[in-house]
Amino acid sequence: MAYSIEPTRPSRLPPDRWVRGIPVALQMLLALGLAAGALYLAEIYWTDIAGTARSLLYTVVHESGHALPEALSKDGEVTEMVFNLDGSGHVRSTGGSDTTLRVGLGLLLPVIVASFLMALGLMRLGLAGALGFIFIALFWLAVFFGREHDMRVFWTICYWAVPALIVAFMPWPLLRSTVVLVYALALAWGAIEALPYLHVEYVDAPMALVAGDEASSQASSTLTGEALEEEQVPSDIRQLADYWNAEDIAEARHYVQAVMIACAAMAAAWVVSFILRHRS
């Protein structure tokens, strides 16, 4: 009886980022478990600090999503961006960008970033670059927007930024992967906690707002001068529904949730594809 022996295809795993002989999926689970364990231990032993820091990280990314279209728009300008330790915040802008993009990106950016970092962390792709970008982005936001109202906000954002810089220069792939996954899980956790916000139509107006400005945030959304006399203003999801001429916010909410699920599904498919290619 003749047997056909097919040549073994050499693994394309980068030897400097993975341990040979151990299944890729197990190495991914190890990094994910370490990241989840780090967040869990922080919640247990530093309950007040950890919860506040995690909430603030989500708020920073959320508000940046509102501000980014304005900063990139030809006619838009960000005049103020505020982060609060209670998880609230707002962005004042001239409203030069598209409403759907400006409001929607605030809701979606934390999920997009979490999905992207989750995929990079599990596959160990571009970790040094990802950590460097995290440090630059967070430190820049801390310096220019975190010091104006509360220095505790500045230091809390720095607590998120500095570890990314330190680990980016360390040679251990598992540590880099774990730290990137910590950021991904923290944002994913924040996004899950913020899901009830998609059912809220009106929120309290920021105390600092004055007539003629606009604001958008998780706890206070885009506001025009006509609505400034009200104690409550439309939430982000209410604004999307109004802009799309939808009476019920459920229609806008379903679109936002569908995009969130799509982002998570794409990241998962990317990781599964990687595992199937590198099963050794």
Image: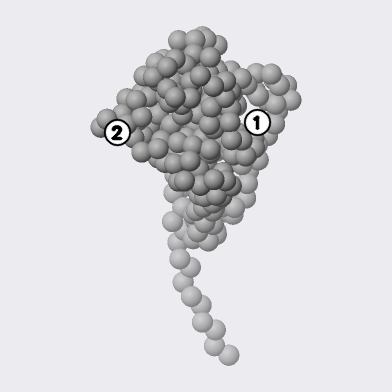
Q: Nearer the viewer, residue 260 or 247?
A: 247
Q: What residue is at 45 percent from the left and 36 percent from the top?
A: 103
Tag 2: amino acid? Ser
Labelled disc at residue 39: 1
Q: Position of residue 2 (x, y in %)?
A: 54, 88
Q: Is residue 231 above or below residue 241?
A: above
Disc 1 crowd, CA 10 A, few/some/many (<14, 14-19, 20+): some
Residue at 55% across, 49% down = 251
Colour theme: one colour
In the picture of the structure, the residue carrying the numbered disc 2 is 73
Q: Quadrant of the C terminus?
A: bottom right
Give the farthest residue toward the right.
Answer: 44
Q: CA distance from mark 2 to mark 1?
A: 37 Å
Q: Earlier in the sequence, mark 2 or mark 1?
A: 1
At label 1, the amino acid type is Leu
Q: Residue furthest left?
A: 74
Residue sitting at 46 percent across and 52 percent down? 13
Asked whether residue 146 is in view, the answer is no
Q: Is residue 9 above or below residue 12?
A: below
Helix, strand or loop at disc 2?
A: loop
